[in-house]
Amino acid sequence: MIRSGLALALLLLFAPGLHAQQGRTTGFLVHQLMVCPSSNMAEINRLDALSRPILDELVEEGVIRAWYMLRHGWGDEWNVGYITVADSHRAWLDYWSEYLRRLRERHPTVLADFQALCTMHKDNMYSIRDSGTGGT
């Protein structure tokens, strides 16, 4: 039992490095979801436009790998979504602090304005184990 526990611990310790050596992409992804009345979409889209230059800067600076803004017209109630991808959980937390700093500096009321437009919010955080995009 101790041997199998030790083997599992070693596998978990070294598996991320082995995975990276195989040329596969790993990282950390956060999927933020909101429930927003469809009557507020035009204003949400206007506020989102204020974030795009900041998000692009953070990608260019290597703070995050990618960002996505999502909408859907059918499905469940979670109709507004955002995805950001970073190298690690720590890198994502650093990105989030810097993103909020820049957003508040340039557009002091945008967060409160946005929060007033949606009724629910949740975050899902994932470790990326594998991917098949790009040249990998």
Image (spheres, grey):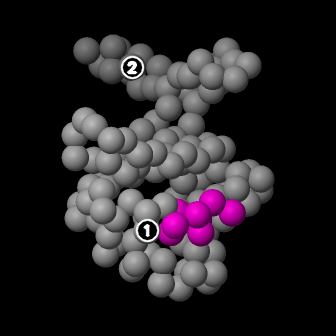
What secondary structure prevails in the magenta region? helix
User: Which x, y percent locates residue 129?
Assistant: 49, 26
Circle 1 sits in a helix, a strand or a loop, which is it?
Answer: helix
**Residue at the (54%, 53%) spot, across then down:** 92
Q: Amino acid at mark 1?
A: Glu
User: Which x, y percent locates residue 17?
Assistant: 62, 26
Q: Quadrant of the N terminus?
A: top left
User: Which x, y percent locates residue 104?
Assistant: 55, 80
User: 87 above or below 18?
Assistant: below
Q: Amino acid at mark 2?
A: Leu
Q: Quadrant of the C terminus?
A: top right
The verdict on residue 49 being magenta is: yes
Q: Which residue is mark 1?
A: 43
Q: Which residue is mark 2?
A: 8
97 with respect to 80 (left or right): right
User: Which of label 1 and label 2 is nearer to you?
Assistant: 1
Which residue is more in the foreground, 29 or 53? Answer: 53
Q: Which residues are magenta?
A: 46-53
For mark 2, does the 10 Å Cα neighbourhood hold few (<14), some (14 to 19), or many (20 or more) residues?
Answer: few
In contact (CB < 8 Å): disc 1 and disc 2: no
Instruction: Answer yes or no: is residue 21 visible.
Output: no
Residue 39 quadrant: bottom left
